[in-house]
Each structure stands twice: as structure tokens, then as C-alpha cells.
Image (cartoon, grey):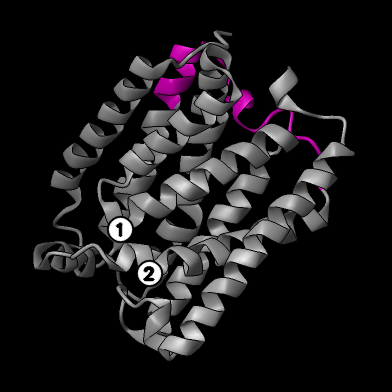
């Protein structure tokens, strides 16, 4: 197995291929009604990208879910709490970026309150993206450039993959966190869970508000919102510090392997 795959240039190549395949498949699924077309496109693109990445990495299919370490329940709970707190904290930053009408119309055309949208957001995307960006890409980048640069580059590609700043900012921050906890635990299911949990919360908010662009500020007064952000920042700090102490007691650390 080529453990040093991919480097930065090869990661750009994976991004271009993933994006290209997505657009190509979209031409064939655009006539499929509802969000079923988006589900099929996302599922197919994830499968193609992962198979290509495994081929270039010279790894077997079993590599994707092999060698997963046991992770405590407290790690899952803290990671989930961090994800929620991060979204609330970044809401005011993301909301400062004007969103053009054409982008809103595009999102409204593919995001529906149905089972296919939920499966795309909460199942296909978390599994496909975590396997590609954490299991394959992160490990190669860390081997080539060290832990810090490897995590930052993998988070950058994860943000770039979303092709818009509104999702990209949150993706970059959560990408850093996911890269860190993956290297500390060696458990890709933990990353998939956090991704699933984050997307499920977003879908629930959309389902009951009828607005995929709603922010936390839409549900609270300004005073309540500021207090909530301060609490969220404190929660993020608490989660990271507690996880640091917890990881210090565990033997596995991919940063040293």
C-alpha cells in the first residue's frame, strides 16, 4: 500500500475528479424528479471517487473500515456537543456573507423535505466524505507533511469540496476537529457519527422551519443570541480540553504511527 498517497497535488486531482464526475452525472440525473437524482448522483460519485482513491493508494476495499479502534461513549458525546456548539458560534460569521439569489434557488431545487434528501445529507455524505477526506486523504497528507499541515490541508480540501463559502467556513473548522479526533482515536466511525449528527440537526431545523437558510439568530433575540454564542464557545473549549485529557490516557495515537 502507498501510505504516502495523496500529496497536495494528488489531493487537488481527487477534488477535480470528484467535482467533474458530479457534474457529469448530474446531466443524466437532472430529469429524475425530486431529490432522488441528487441522492443517486451523490452515491455514485462517492463510490467512484473512493474506488479511484483506493486504486491510486494501492489499498484494498477493506482498508476503508479496517483497523478501527474502540472509542468510548464520552468521546462520541463530546464530539457531538462540539459540532453543535461550532455551528452556533460560526452562524454570525457565515451570515455576514451575502448569499446571491441564484445560489438560494439552486439549493431550494435540490433540498426537499423527503427521505432522499435526508439519506443524502445524513448517510451518503457523511460516509463517503469521511472515508475520502479523513481515511484516505488525511492519512496521506500527514505522512507527507506532518500532523499540523496534514490536518489543515485536509480541512482545506474538505472546505473547497463544498464549492461555496457558506458551507465552506464551517467545513474547514469541523474538518480540523475531525482530523484531530481521527488521528487521536483511529476510529473513522467517530468522524462519520459527528458528520451524521451535524447534518441531521441541520435537516431537522430545515424540516420544521421550512427555511434551509435559517440561522440561530432567527429563533432568538439579540441578547439571547449573544449569550448562546458565549455558552457555545465555552462548550467548544470544554469539549477540546476534556478530549485532550481523555486522549492522553489512551494508547493509540496515529500521529506517532
Q: Secondary structure at mark 1?
A: helix
Mark with earlier residue (1, 2)? 2
180 vs 25, left or right, is right
Residue that appears at 32% across and 84% down: 210
Q: Is residue 39 visible?
A: no
> In the image, is residue 173 above or below residue 90?
above
Q: Is residue 180 visible?
A: yes
Image position, residue 253 (x, y; %): 77, 28
Magenta stretch bounds = 51-71
Q: On the rendered structure, is 239 left or right of 193?
A: right
For the N terminus, the image quarter is top right
Viewer-closest of 49 and 206: 206
Identify the residue position indicated by label 1 in the image.
166
Whether residue 114 appears in magenta in the rendering, the answer is: no
Vertical relation: 152 (above or below) 74: above
Residue picked out by circle 2? 92
Q: SS class of the residue under badge 2?
A: helix
Label 2 Cα neighbours within 10 Å, binned few <14 / some 14-19 / many ≥20: some
Give left or right: position of 65 versus 214.
Answer: right
| Contact flag, marks 1 and 2 (Cβ < 8 Å) | no
Q: Nearer the viewer, residue 23 or 25?
A: 23
Amino acid at each position: 500500500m502507498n501510505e504516502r498517497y495523496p500529496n497536495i497535488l494528488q489531493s487537488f486531482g481527487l477534488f477535480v475528479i470528484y467535482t467533474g464526475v458530479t457534474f457529469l452525472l448530474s446531466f443524466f440525473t437532472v430529469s429524475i424528479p425530486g431529490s432522488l437524482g441528487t441522492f443517486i448522483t451523490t452515491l455514485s460519485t462517492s463510490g467512484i471517487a473512493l474506488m479511484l482513491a483506493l486504486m491510486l493508494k494501492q489499498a484494498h476495499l477493506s482498508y476503508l473500515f479496517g483497523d478501527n479502534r474502540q472509542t468510548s461513549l464520552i468521546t462520541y458525546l463530546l464530539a457531538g456537543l462540539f459540532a453543535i456548539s461550532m455551528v452556533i458560534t460560526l452562524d454570525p460569521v457565515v451570515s455576514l456573507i451575502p448569499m446571491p439569489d441564484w445560489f438560494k434557488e439552486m439549493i431550494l431545487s435540490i433540498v426537499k423535505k423527503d427521505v432522499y434528501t435526508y439519506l443524502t445529507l445524513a448517510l451518503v455524505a457523511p460516509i463517503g466524505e469521511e472515508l475520502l477526506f479523513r481515511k484516505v486523504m488525511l492519512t496521506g497528507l500527514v505522512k507527507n507533511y506532518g500532523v499540523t499541515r496534514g490536518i489543515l490541508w485536509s480541512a482545506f480540501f474538505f472546505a473547497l469540496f463544498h464549492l461555496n463559502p457558506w458551507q465552506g467556513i464551517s467545513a474547514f473548522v469541523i474538518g480540523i476537529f475531525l482530523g484531530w479526533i481521527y488521528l487521536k482515536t483511529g476510529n473513522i466511525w467517530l468522524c462519520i457519527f459527528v458528520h451524521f449528527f451535524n447534518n441531521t440537526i441541520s435537516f431537522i431545523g430545515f424540516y420544521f422551519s421550512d427555511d434551509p437558510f435559517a440561522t440561530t439568530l432567527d429563533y432568538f433575540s439579540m441578547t439571547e443570541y449573544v449569550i448562546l454564542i458565549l455558552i457555545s464557545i465555552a462548550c467548544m473549549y470544554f469539549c477540546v480540553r476534556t478530549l485532550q485529557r481523555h486522549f492522553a490516557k489512551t494508547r493509540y495515537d496515529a500521529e506517532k504511527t
